[in-house]
Amino acid sequence: MKKNRLFFLLPYSLWILLFVIAPMILIAFDAFTGSHGEFTWSNFVQFFSDTTFLRMTLNSFWYAFLITVITLLISYPMAYILSHMKNQQFWLLLIILPTWINLLLKAYAFIGIFARDGLVNHFLSFFGIGPANILFTDFAFIFVATYIEIPFMILPIYNAICDIDPALINAARDLGASKWQVLGKIIWPLSRSGVESGIQAVFIPSLSLFMLTRLIGGNRVITLGTAIEEYFLTTMNWHMGSTIGVVLIVLMLIVMLTTNRKRHHQEVR
Amino acid sequence: MDIIKLEHVTKQYDDGFIALNDISLTIESGKFYSLLGPSGSGKTTILRIMAGFSEPTEGKVYFAGQDITALDASKRQINTVFQNYALFPHMNVYENVAFGLEIKKQKKSKIQAAVKDALHMVQLDDFANREISELSGGQQQRVAIARALVNQPKVLLLDESLSALDKHLRKDMQFELRAIQKKLGITFIFVTHDQEEALAMSDEIFVLDKGKIQQSGSPVDIYDEPVNDFVARFIGDSNIVLGRMVRDFEVEFVNRRFECADAGIPAGEKVEIVLRPEDLDLVRPEDGKLDVIVQSQLFLGDHYEIKAKDMDDNEWLIHSTNATQVGKEVGVFFDSEDIHVMRFGESEADFDKRLETYEGDETGEKR
């Protein structure tokens, strides 16, 4: 019996070992070695003493933060409304569908929409406002990133809201709570696990976005993700790229830990 | 004083299912009521309409004389103890009980005192800081009661609140609920499918089936004088046989004539006879009104449950404190008052009217 279970565990363990643990060890190894393979802290020293890197880190954080907040502001009400609608499966499908399309294709589609002779500018010119520079702006970058991340925020929140026992909502109303109080005191706290997973699912990938920064942001937005890509593919400095990777992993861990805090209670004697 | 009144309330769901069919009932202040019926009988729907979670398709709901049919649940002076307690899992015991008062923005010191009192009443004095997940079912039940009572409602609704507890705990809670109700003097409306529970706790019972009130009255009335065979079968065990009215105070069944306590039914009308198993006594064959042969015997602790058959193959259920032997021929004795005659299709109102014609006093005892 026990042997059997170990057997079934094998593919999963191999997967984790080869594609999660091994790459992380390789990255850590590269980050702590110099160009001749010797152990060194110099990569980290360089990272933390160079204002460019620090600015990039802050930049990454700031944009990831903006993307997450905007995504959350849009997704929570949508998930809430969705959980109260008829034909939920249909609307869910509409939300999931865009995730089946390749990220690059979506990015190119937005280039078409936002370009100088694109759809939006045609529309704006019709009212005599445009054409405006939309592509290669912060706005475009955040807009597209948010669009792409929304399903990953809506789904966990929607699931968490659906898991709430309707009797709890009746109980709160029974005890005198208004619709808004029910939302604030019951639904929000009980769907927090969904919000937390949503934030993790959006914030962490947003930290290392790199393709969109180039295609939509026109490289005006430089994040850690962009930097890693540059180091690995353009300057071929794998050691520095790995160092940034390690910093990114540590930042992600911090985010995960802080979003999993336990709430505290009113204590009485 | 009437506290809640339902007038011709009908509830039809979108799929056409009629959960309640023209229900009218009056709840008096300070009494313990039970809504008793099998699942799907509409008892929970009545509760939901009283609490305000559901609006009737037709009809009106009055609270202390005021029409509250469309009033939001949050504005009613009615609180509910839910079937699975519906305690807020993200709050501890104190926060759960304090919820209603905090919504009403009462002072913190006042809330603390009220919560303390409420927890004391349900004997959970030291549990304020516990998590809900740390409580047993019985304790959660008590928290749910405290959470509702702390708001000082005029009416407390209890939705199958004891059904998740084990038998022992349930008995304890029945006594306790009854004691709390007596102490606070507020109206309790208890929904249950358990007839024993309803009989044990209530001042008055509404027996429901298929969205209609089948009978209402005190536990004794309902047990002793069921108006139809649904009530007779649902409340307690019963032997039901077909019979024929011979004349007033005389009825014929199993091909014999018996003296009975019912009148006002046309002679010759086909009727149903209810005999409660505990009203049947085992005697020697020559002393009995019926001769039966014992088919099986079960020992149930406080009595024996005996199944026997008479000469016409009718099965009789008899509760006896004394044992007998399977296969033995015995006599069955019962008093004339133990015979309950039910007319086919007679409503509760018709029954009461008929009763008045030969008993002559309105308030009275129905036997």
Image (tube, helix red, strand yellow):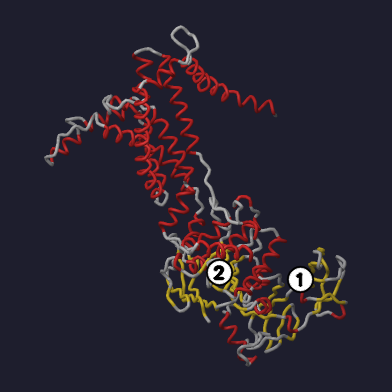
User: Quarter of the image holding residue B177?
Assistant: bottom right
Res. A135 visible in picture: yes
Q: Residue at x 27, y 28 (%)?
A: A217
User: Is B163 left, or right, of A79 in this rendering?
Assistant: right
Res. B160 visible in picture: no
Closest to the observer: A108 or B195?
A: A108
Which of pointers 2 and 1 lies earlier in the amino acid sequence? 2
Q: Residue at x 65, y 66 (%)?
A: B194
Q: CA distance from mark 2 to mark 1?
A: 41 Å
Query: Label 1 sits on what residue type?
Result: Trp
User: Is A115 left, or right, of B60 in this rendering?
Assistant: left
Query: Label 2 sits on what residue type?
Result: Leu
Name the residue beneath numbered marker 2. B156
Closest to the observer: B60 or B70?
A: B70
- Quick check: A35 above or below B163? above
Name the residue beneath numbered marker 1. B316
User: Quarter of the image holding residue A130?
Assistant: top left
Q: Position of residue A10 (x, y in %)?
A: 60, 23
Label 2 residue SS: strand
Subunit ID for the residue under disc 2? B
Task: Check if mark 2's residue and mark 1's residue have beta carbons within 8 Å.
Answer: no
User: Is B133 left, or right, of B105 in this rendering?
Assistant: right
Q: Position of residue B142 (x, y in %)?
A: 62, 61
